[in-house]
Image (spheres, rainbow, N blue to C red):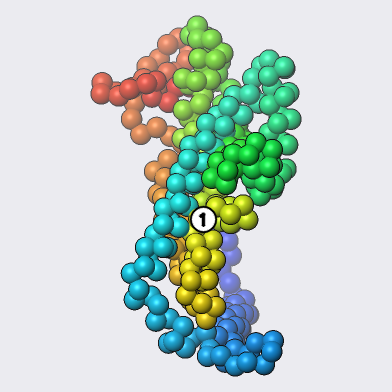
Amino acid sequence: MSSSVLYDAPGPKARRRSKIISIVGIVLILGLIAWVFSALAAPRVSINGAVSPSLLDPSRWDIFSDVQLWLGLGDGLAATLRMAGVAAVGAIVIGLLFCFGRTSATAWIRIPSSILLEFFRGIPVLLLMLFTLLVFSTGAYWAGVAGLAIYNGAIIGEALRAGILSLPKGQRESGLALGLTPLKTRLIIEFPQAFRQMLPIIIAQLVVLLKDTSLAYVISYPELLRKGMTFLANYYGENYRFSLFVIVLAIYLALNLALSWLARVVARRTAGGRPKRGRRTTVGEKVLLQPDAGGTGVGGGAIL
């Protein structure tokens, strides 16, 4: 069996131990699944002693042939996506402002930006929503959008700042040597590379933003969770609450898995943040990355 300097092939005892751990893990997982299934299949007993069918009983799932149910869930999903879409755009804009503010060479811009960013990162999203709703009386929709945009914008701003700081110092020095101002160097050379490197992280944060739209339930915004677990559950009856919970869970899971898949695709295509097109032109001792004939922009900036 082949081995490398960094990895030794497991011996008989290690293989036997690994096999035992795997078997125990599989048994525990199967036991957990069986326990959950038995709990769902057991008849439900209320506080006053009334017995109702189990959560898996067909009588709890017959509403899904009703078109009005899916129309109601569609309205809730549209409201969720409407809030998430506007909040995502706002979060990216706010993240850009925080990024440029925190990396500014001017202290009176950098210090207040740092204080505000740490303040908003430390406040729960729900409190931001409630603050906006109670203080500015914006309504549930804009309170939710503001809370999501500000909090996630602070996170995205830190990610972009980390991307800029991870670039070699020669990137900035080359731009300044070419006569670009510090702001143009940041906008034309550094920021495009940092954004490309941090794009998978930004998309992952947008997945969090989408999930956090469910917090708007508390401020009475009719998003997917509130629509399914309150409006539709009250309309169809308490017996269908678990069934509605399952379908709402499945919709959220499908949306988040789709965004997570997009993040993985972007991560593969931007691996290492290296531009895929461009030619190198030597200027003195520096090497500049120029765009192809059909390219646009600076093509990734200047590098030493």
- For the point 49% across and 33% down, the residue is 195
Q: Position of residue 86 (x, y in %)?
A: 48, 40
Q: Position of residue 85 (x, y in %)?
A: 45, 43
Residue type (three-letter) at the residue carrying disc 1 = Pro
Q: Where is mark 1, residue-wise?
A: 222
- For the point 51% across and 65% down, the residue is 231
Q: Residues within 10 Å of mark 1 (few under 14, many from 20)?
A: many
Q: Splitting the image into 4 quarters, where does residue 8 fall? A: bottom right
- For the point 48% across and 68% down, the residue is 232
Pick the residue in front: 147 or 158: 147
Q: Residue furthest top?
A: 179
201 versus 290 height, above or below: below
Pick the residue in front: 168 or 160: 160
Q: Position of residue 34 (x, y in %)?
A: 55, 87
151 versus 186 height, above or below: below
Q: Position of residue 241 (x, y in %)?
A: 53, 75
- Under circle 1, the secondary element is loop
Pick the residue in front: 257 or 28: 257
289 versus 64 height, above or below: above
8 versus 50 height, above or below: above
Pick the residue in front: 275 or 62: 62
Whether residue 155 is visible here, answered yes or no, is no
Whether residue 180 is visible here, answered yes or no, is yes
Q: Is 284 left, or right, of 32 in this rendering?
A: left
- For the point 53% across and 20% down, the residue is 186
